Amino acid sequence: MNINTSNQAQSALMPVIYIPHGGGPMPLLGDADHKELIAYLSQIHNNIETPKVILMITAHWESHNVSISSSPQPGMIYDYGGFPQETYQYQYPASGEPKVANQIADLFKAKGIKSNLDMNRGYDHGTFVPLMLMYPNADIPVVQMSLLRSLNPKEHIKIGEALSTLREQGVLIVGSGMSFHNFRGSLEESIEFDNWLNETLTANDMEQSKQDLIQWEQAPSARACHAREEHLLPMHVCFGAAMKQNTPATRVFSDYLFNRKISAFMW
């Protein structure tokens, strides 16, 4: 079941973006450490075509099989603690898009990827925090997608590959995580890993990059930057979604958050 493109082909492929979503709701509170990230997220819509639907791969949802939100009106999940009361009253009233959720399930089935539709899942902060900055009018339908609980990097790239045709239909694929996510790691380690990530994602040989990403734990300071990789793997999904076009990523944002290096990439 395809998205209605009003009898006109999409003028160009929608980009794929891997973004850092920051610490909990802190970007929405105007936290000083998040100043540059807030500025970046807030201007994304100025530089790309308005999507028909947004597909968010969130670091804050894991399931045995890939889960896809299918409610026409998702609720909110405030999956953080210890913040001001106002942060538990945020609303992001963007509609869901069940037709696209079903289409994604069909794409997965065709590739032998097990998935389930979830009518109950609301928007977690990996979704609503960046989207409240990126598309504050909440007027674009959103489908939210989980990671696999196995955290298998090869499988997440395969998931992305199955999603690639959505780019032709006006779907903006966004991987929401953090390129650095372990504050026991040092500034130097965060820079070392960020440099490796940039070199890998922007390299012209995407097949080699794929192998490097599958073996990401061998990268410099990899485990110092990701004691657990759930915030990195949305990037693997994004990479997979971009492989069909064989166009390397561009690093579109790079700054320091809590004195650690973080980056965003776009394909």
Image (cartoon, rainbow, N blue to C red):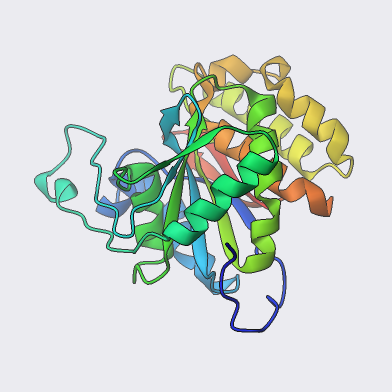
Is the C terminus in the top left, top right, bottom left or bottom right quadrant? bottom right
Residue placed at 72% from the left, 39% from the top?
Answer: 198
Near-viewer residue (194 or 86):
86
In the image, residue 178 sits, relative to residue 183, either above or below, namely below
Spot occupied by residue 26 in the image (x, y as percentages of width and height):
30, 45
Q: Is residue 142 left or right of residue 86?
A: right
Spot occupied by residue 83 in the image (x, y as percentages of width and height):
17, 38
In the image, residue 136 sits, relative to residue 174, either above or below, namely below
Near-viewer residue (256 or 150):
150
Q: Is residue 162 left or right of residue 199?
A: left
Quarter of the view holding residue 171: bottom right
Farthest left residue?
Answer: 85
Residue placed at 71% from the left, 66% from the top?
Answer: 13
Q: Is residue 187 left or right of residue 121?
A: right
In the image, residue 189 sits, relative to residue 76, either above or below, namely above
Is the N terminus in the top left, top right, bottom left or bottom right quadrant? bottom right
Farthest right residue?
Answer: 205
> Is residue 40 in view from this perspective?
no
Residue placed at 70% from the left, 57% from the top?
Answer: 165
Near-viewer residue (211 or 106):
106
Spot occupied by residue 28 in the image (x, y as percentages of width and height):
29, 53
Near-viewer residue (10 or 25):
10
Q: Is residue 264 left or right of residue 215?
A: left
Spot occupied by residue 128 in the image (x, y as percentages of width and height):
34, 52
Residue placed at 35% from the left, 38% from the top?
Answer: 23
> Is residue 122 in view from this perspective?
yes
Number of numbered markers: 0
